[in-house]
């Protein structure tokens, strides 16, 4: 027995030692890829030395003798901190994820190959102007210098993820940077989902008023009633078809329309600024990840310094400022995509119908390599309208009749995409007007760009705007027959037709993805907008002050009052407020009274420390589900987010919308008050199951955690605790400090989409300008800069945005000197 115990002790000790040695070895290998920011390195491709000064937030300030050398330095810095993110994004755009991740990503690769974005990016290289081509070439050389350094000096393959996956890193090329821009267009594409959902819903709701209830237009001048989708397609269609969309993988760039992009931006002219200079604020909204998509940088170019937010892989400040001009971006929600239903030739399925008869598809074979499995060959097919998409994508199978296929026309599919030239040109502009002129080559994704120079402010919608015929059958709102000439695009509208607002009389301009113009089709810009609520709060905050300051703009960015809650709550609770005696303790009625008592004194602030936001959010979610599930059946599950305009129409009985309150399958006739009461009970039961019965101790932030998850390692046991960043947050779907909730029924209120970058630029005192991102500069989870900015972001704090080189050097964490190879 003693011998057994002795050997058991020895084996246990040996196992512990081996585990410790393994952990130390892994740490040593992964830490080898941590960048050294304080060094001198000889590299090929430079004309003169480049200096990269890292300030105490690890923001690189890049100085060089020529613009090309500065772009080289940016490429090197991006690759130092975000190499894994860059190569993963490039593989996504190329449709080559499965070479690394195996069968998990085959469907993503198939879809990306069908869009053919990378081939289009390669064709677009030759369309760039000389300045942009030089920038792209120098930037690629900088990225490749870092890759060469990693390989030469055995620096842990450049990122810890490289040890877990056998990733061959090819040299960076100018086409790769253009592909990054197209990939961002994919992530912000929401029109396809909306068209399909509208078509599917119209098959169940033949009454046009009811379709307008659940998919409402933003208030304003309406449009002519649309035909039912069934009348557009002269072929058998299912009354309802089961959801066919593939699962949403964290590596997929395709997002639901609710998460396809948003943002805030606003500017004040000198006469509305306390210090007499222009002010500009921006917080673009994208899906959260670790690391964040944004990367802060400063470039000292020949025309002066520029500083702000970049995306690794793209050599441009996409939101930021120079010494004389600031620019901010928000999603414009331009309708720059149309879905078509193409009729196959019954005699030859390799042909499709056009206005002039049947024509053959343009086809090409494409081979997808899959790790540890045999490759898959797919056939890419294109029509005159665009690529043929798989029936599983975005539930296209549910609205595509037999003998037909679905295609898509989309501005991002341009083979002469000069968006990057517009971004490079904007950094050289020095006024609102020159900035607007520089943005003319912009193609996709369409944006509203808000500008502020030293004296003026303005906003321009940029991006290619399709020109549609007035006779278009669905006005681009639903899929239409691709063989009818009137449904096809008639070219691109002139840049001058894009909305433009310069020097507004009131001295304030801004956008929260709200409706910006009311123009008749086909110059309408869009029928679907990204916001009908936040803009109300923004208007109030802007007009409450005669003059604004940097701090008042910050206050607006961080505002968490929900105008939707303030509007909806009095409507749905009108007949429920407690006025009599308290119900017995422990009863459902008593719990309902407690909830209503809390909500009765709530001001609509979605504060992370308060219980009311959680009660309200659970209530309206349950209410919308109850209202629509009998009319829409399984399709109701596709409506994952509450639509305030729908609830408002129902409870104000707009155009008879209160009919939604009566449950069709039940004998009694339910009132809207009945539905509100039952939904509140549903919500309270759900809350009790997840958070307990003590309503007063609930915290919205417990349910509304920001999910900055690693897209590859975020679900790996143990590792996920090192790579994921979770934070209790305020805000909600309809607050200026937007924290968009997800679509996971198990955790419906997680904060998955919001302001990954915030910046406020003050031209009265430029060095007092500030910015922040939601995680940190580094993509290396062992780096202290992986999440160091995240806590500041959560608390609503910022770091300085200065073009003063001495300030950057004074608190530098390191300075890298790149010198040309002799």
Image (tube, helix red, strand yellow):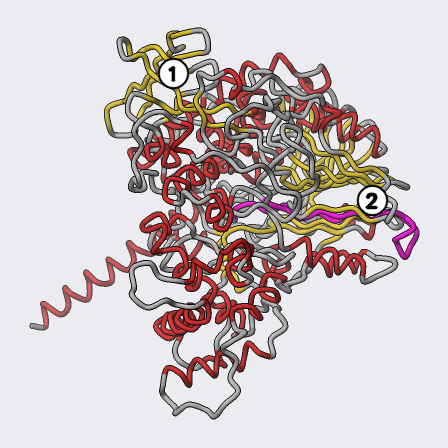
Towards the viewer: 644 or 131: 644
User: Does residue 567 sit above or below 49 in this rendering?
Assistant: below
Task: Please state the extent of the stretch shown in magenta in the rendering.
Answer: 262-287
Image location of residue 379, percent across then percent down: 33, 16
Magenta segment's dominant SS is: strand
User: Does residue 66 sit above or below 85 in this rendering?
Assistant: above
Res. 113 visible in picture: no
Residue 284 magenta-highlighted: yes
Residue identifier under label 2: 804
Q: In the drawing, what numbered circle is on residue 119?
A: none
At mark 1, the secondary structure is: strand
Q: Is residue 706 left or right of residue 425?
A: left
Residue plotted at (65% across, 33% down) = 524
Image location of residue 303, percent across then percent down: 83, 28
Q: Are the two marked residues, 1 and 2, in contact with CB atoms closer than 8 angstroms?
A: no
Residue plotted at (64% across, 65% down) = 561
User: Does residue 696 sit above or below 652 in this rendering?
Assistant: below
Whichever of labels 1 and 2 marks the residue nearer the N terminus, that label is 1
Res. 327 visible in picture: yes
User: What is the quadrant of residue 13 in the picture?
Assistant: bottom left
**How many C-alpha atoms fall within 10 Å of the one at disc 2: few (<14), some, or many (≥20)?**
few
Residue identifier under label 1: 381
Work out how far the residue at label 1 is from the one at label 2, CA to CA, in angstroms.
53 Å
Towards the viewer: 47 or 412: 412
Figure quadrant of the C terminus? top right
At mark 2, the secondary structure is: loop
User: Does residue 239 sit above or below 521 in this rendering?
Assistant: below
């Amino acid at each position: 027995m003693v011998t057994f115990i002795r050997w058991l002790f020895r084996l246990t000790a040996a196992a512990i030692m081996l585990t410790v040695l393994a952990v130390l070895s892994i740490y040593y290998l992964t830490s080898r890829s941590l960048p050294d920011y304080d060094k001198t390195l000889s590299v090929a491709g430079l004309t003169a030395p480049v200096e990269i000064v890292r300030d105490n937030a690890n923001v690189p300030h890049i100085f060089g003798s020529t613009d090309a050398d500065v772009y080289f330095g940016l490429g090197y810095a991006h690759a130092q901190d975000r190499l894994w993110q860059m190569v993963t994004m490039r593989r996504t755009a190329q449709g080559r994820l499965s070479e690394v991740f195996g069968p998990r990503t085959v469907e993503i690769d198939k879809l990306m190959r069908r869009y053919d974005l990378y081939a289009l990016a390669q064709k677009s290289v030759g369309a760039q102007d000389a300045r942009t081509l030089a920038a792209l070439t120098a930037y690629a050389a900088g990225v490749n210098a870092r890759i060469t350094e990693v390989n030469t000096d055995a620096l842990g393959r450049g990122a810890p993820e490289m040890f877990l996956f056998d990733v061959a890193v090819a040299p960076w090329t100018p086409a790769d940077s253009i592909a990054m821009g197209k990939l961002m267009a994919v992530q912000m594409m929401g029109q396809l989902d909306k068209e399909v959902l509208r078509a599917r819903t119209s098959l169940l709701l033949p009454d046009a008023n009811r379709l307008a209830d659940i998919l409402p237009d933003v208030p304003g001048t309406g449009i002519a009633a649309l035909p039912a989708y069934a009348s557009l397609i002269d072929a058998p269609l299912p009354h309802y078809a089961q959801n066919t969309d593939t699962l949403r993988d964290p590596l997929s760039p395709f997002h639901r329309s609710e998460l396809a992009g948003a943002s805030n931006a606003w500017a004040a002219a000198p006469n509305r600024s306390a210090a007499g200079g222009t002010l500009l604020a921006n917080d673009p909204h994208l899906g959260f990840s670790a690391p964040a998509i944004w990367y802060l940088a400063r470039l000292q170019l020949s025309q002066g310094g520029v500083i702000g937010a970049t995306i690794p892989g793209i050599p441009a400040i996409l939101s930021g400022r120079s010494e004389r001009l600031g620019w901010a971006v928000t999603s414009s929600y331009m309708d720059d995509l149309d879905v078509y239903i193409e009729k196959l030739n019954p005699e030859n399925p390799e042909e499709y119908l056009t206005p002039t008869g049947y024509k053959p598809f343009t086809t090409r074979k494409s081979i997808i390599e899959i790790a540890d499995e045999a490759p898959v060959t797919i056939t890419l097919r294109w029509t005159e309208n665009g690529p043929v998409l798989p029936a599983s994508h975005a539930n296209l199978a549910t609205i595509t009749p037999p003998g037909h296929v679905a295609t898509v026309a989309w501005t991002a599919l341009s083979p002469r995409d000069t968006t990057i030239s517009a971004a490079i040109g904007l950094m050289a502009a020095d006024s609102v007007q020159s900035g607007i002129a520089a943005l003319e080559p912009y193609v996709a994704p369409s944006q509203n760009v808000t500008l502020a120079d030293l004296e003026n402010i303005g906003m321009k919608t940029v991006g290619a705007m399709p020109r549609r015929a007035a006779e278009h059958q669905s006005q681009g709102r639903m899929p239409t027959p691709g063989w009818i000439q009137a449904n096809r695009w008639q070219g691109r509208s002139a840049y001058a037709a894009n909305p433009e607002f310069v020097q507004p009389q009131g001295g304030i301009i801004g956008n929260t993805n709200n409706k910006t113009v009311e123009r008749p089709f086909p110059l309408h810009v869009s029928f679907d907008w990204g916001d009908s609520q936040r803009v109300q709060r923004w208007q109030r905050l802007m007009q409450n002050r005669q003059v604004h300051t940097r701090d008042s703009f910050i206050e607006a960015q961080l505002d968490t009052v929900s105008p939707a809650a303030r509007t909806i709550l009095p409507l749905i609770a009108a007949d429920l407020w407690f006025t009599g005696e308290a119900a017995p303790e422990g009863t459902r009625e008593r719990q309902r009274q407690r909830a209503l008592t809390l909500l009765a004194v709530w001001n609509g602030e979605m504060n992370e420390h308060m219980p009311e936001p959680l009660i309200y959010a659970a209530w309206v979610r349950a209410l919308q589900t109850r209202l629509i599930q009998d009319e829409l059946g399984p399709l109701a599950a596709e409506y994952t987010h509450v639509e305030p305009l729908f609830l408002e129409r129902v409870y104000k009985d707009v155009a008879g919308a209160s009919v939604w309150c009566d449950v069709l399958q039940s004998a009694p006739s339910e009132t809207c008050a009945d539905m509100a009461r039952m939904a509140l009970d549903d919500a309270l039961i759900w809350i009790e199951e997840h958070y307990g019965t003590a309503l007063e101790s609930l915290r919205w932030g417990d349910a509304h955690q920001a999910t900055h998850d690693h897209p590859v390692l975020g679900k790996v046991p143990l590792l996920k605790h090192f790579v994921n960043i979770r934070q209790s947050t305020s805000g909600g779907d309809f607050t200026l400090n937007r924290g968009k909730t997800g679509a996971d029924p198990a955790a419906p209120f997680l904060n998955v989409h919001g302001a990954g970058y915030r910046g406020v630029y003050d031209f009265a005192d430029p060095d007092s300008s500030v910015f922040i991102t939601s995680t940190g500069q580094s993509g290396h989870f062992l780096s202290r800069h992986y999440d160091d900015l995240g806590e500041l972001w959560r608390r609503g704090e910022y770091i300085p945005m200065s073009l003063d080189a001495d300030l950057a050097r004074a608190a530098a964490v390191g300075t890298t000197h790149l010198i040309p190879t002799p």
